[in-house]
Amino acid sequence: MSGRLRSSPAWTGAAIAAGVLASATALAGRLDLPLILIGLAAVLLGGWLGGRDRDAPAPRPAAAAPRHAVAEALLAHVPDPVILVDRRTLVVEANPAARALLPALHYARPLSFALRDPEVLDGIEAVLSSGMPRRVALSTRIPLERTFEVQIGALPMPDGSGVSALLFLRDLTSARRLEAMRVDFVANASHELRTPLATLIGFIETLQGPAREDAAARERFLEIMRVQALRMTRLIDDLLSLSRIELREHVAPTAVVDLGALARQMVDAQGPPAEARGATIRFEDGHGPYRVPGDADELVRVIENLIENAVKYGGGRIGVGLAREDDPRHGRRIVLSVTDDGPGIPPEHIPRLTERFYRVDVASSRARGGTGLGLAIVKHSLNRHRGRLTIESVVGQGTIVRVSLPEYGAVAPMQPLADQAGPA
C-alpha cells in the first residue's frame, strides 16, 4: 500500500471504526473471532473504496469556456477570412468574414462543400501530413472576380486529438486591381489622348505661323482648341472614374438610397441640356419609394450616363421610368428604364456597347462629346451593386435601356453577374 493511501482520510476513518468496534467487544467481556474478521474486512473495504478515486488527478479550474469565448471574439474582429479544419478537413471554426465569403461553409462539414479549389485542398492535405506551412493562390469568379493568398499552417487540436490546419485568406483583389488600373490607364490615355493632342499642337503651330495675323482664323482655331481641351478633360475624368469603380467593384455598398429620388434629381438636371438639343424628358416614378442598397454618387452617375446617351444619340422624346418586378431567379428587383425614339442601334453592335471606347459611329460620337466610356462605367457600377443591364433596340424605332437592382430587404440567391443585351 502506498504512503498516499495510508494517509488517506478514508483509511484513517476505517481504522478508527475498527478500533471502536474492538474496544466495545473487549468491554463486553468476550472476544468474538468472526466479529473481528468482519471488522477487518470492513476496514479494508472502506479504505479501498474511499481511496481509489485518489489516483485520479485533481480537477482543474474550468477555464476552457472563457478561453473559447475569447478566441471567438478575436476571430470575429479579424477582417480577413480565417478557417480551422481538423485532420479530416471538417470545419471546426470560422470567423464571420469566412462565412460571408463562403455562404456554404458549415461547422462539422467538409470544407470541400464550400470551397472546391483543388490547389487549396491539396495544400491542406500536404500541411496535415507534413506539418510544414504552405501558401497557395485562390481566385473566385462568382459573384465577382476576387484574388486571395491562402496561408495554411499546422495547429494542434485543443483536445489533443491530432493536428488541424488553419487557413488565413489574405485579400489581394484591391492590389491586383490597382496594378491593372495603372497599366490600363497608361494604355488608354496614351491611345485616346493622341488625337486631341495632335489637333492642339497643329493649331498652335498654325497660330504661331501662317495665321499669326489672321484674327478670324485665330478665333475659329481657338474655339476648336477649347473643344479639344474639354474633350481631353472629360476623357481623363471618365478614365479616373472608371478606375476608381473597378478598384472597389468587389466591395458591395452598404448604404440605402432611394433610386426614385436620384432619378428625379437627374431628370431635373438634364432637362435644360436636353431641350437645347431639341429633346424632352418625361419621368414616371410610379409608386415609390424605391429603396436599394447602393452608393448614391455611383448610381447618380449611372442614371446621368444613360440619360445623356439617350439625349445625344436618341433625341426626340425620352422616357425615364421606375417599376418593381419579381424575378424567380433574383428575387424582388427595382427596374429603371430609359427609352428614346431615335434611330436605334444595329443588333451586331449591342453586345459590345459596354466595352471601353467602343462606339457605333466613331465620328458622330466624338462630335457629340462622347468618350466611349459611359456604358463601361455603368456596367462596372452595376457589378458592384449586384445589378443587371439590358439593352434592347430596333433600328428606326428607338432604344430601351433597363437597369435592374435588388430591392432593399429582399433576399435572393447569389447568381453570377452578366450583362444581357439583345434586340427587341
Image: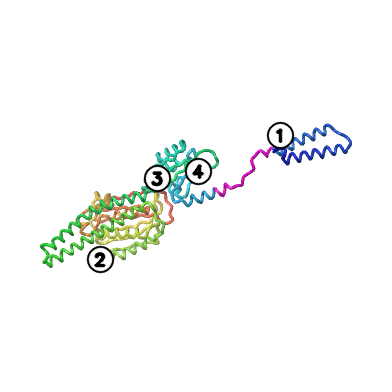
Q: Was residue 60 drawn as part of the magenta stretch in this picture?
A: yes
Q: Secondary structure at mark 4?
A: strand
- Residue extent of the magenta highlight: 52-67
Q: Which dot, 2 or 3, sits closer to the camera?
A: 3
Residue linked to disc 1:
1
Determine which residue is flagged by label 4. Answer: 92
Q: With 78 as the anchor, is 342 left or right in this view?
A: left
What amino acid is at disc 4? Val
Q: Answer with mark 4 or mark 2, whichever residue precedes in sequence.
A: 4
Q: Earlier in the sequence, mark 4 or mark 1?
A: 1
For badge 2, the amino acid type reads: Glu
User: What kind of element bears circle 2?
Assistant: helix
- Which class describes the residues within 10 Å of circle 2: few (<14), some (14-19), or many (20+)? some
Find residue 356 and report its horizontal and vertical position in percent: 27, 52
Reading the image, the residue beneath label 2 is 275
Labelled pair 4, 2 in contact (Cβ < 8 Å): no
Instruction: Look at the image and tell me in which quarter the N terminus lies.
Output: top right
Q: Secondary structure at mark 1?
A: loop
Q: Amino acid at mark 1?
A: Met
On the image, the x and y values in percent for residue 267 come to 31, 63
Residue 424 visible to the viewer:
no
Q: Quadrant of residue 242?
A: bottom left
Sequence order check, earlier mark of 2 and 1: 1
Q: CA distance from mark 4 to mark 2?
A: 64 Å
Whole-angstrom CA distance, mark 4 to mark 3, is 21 Å
Q: Are marks 2 and 1 in contact (CB under 8 Å)?
A: no
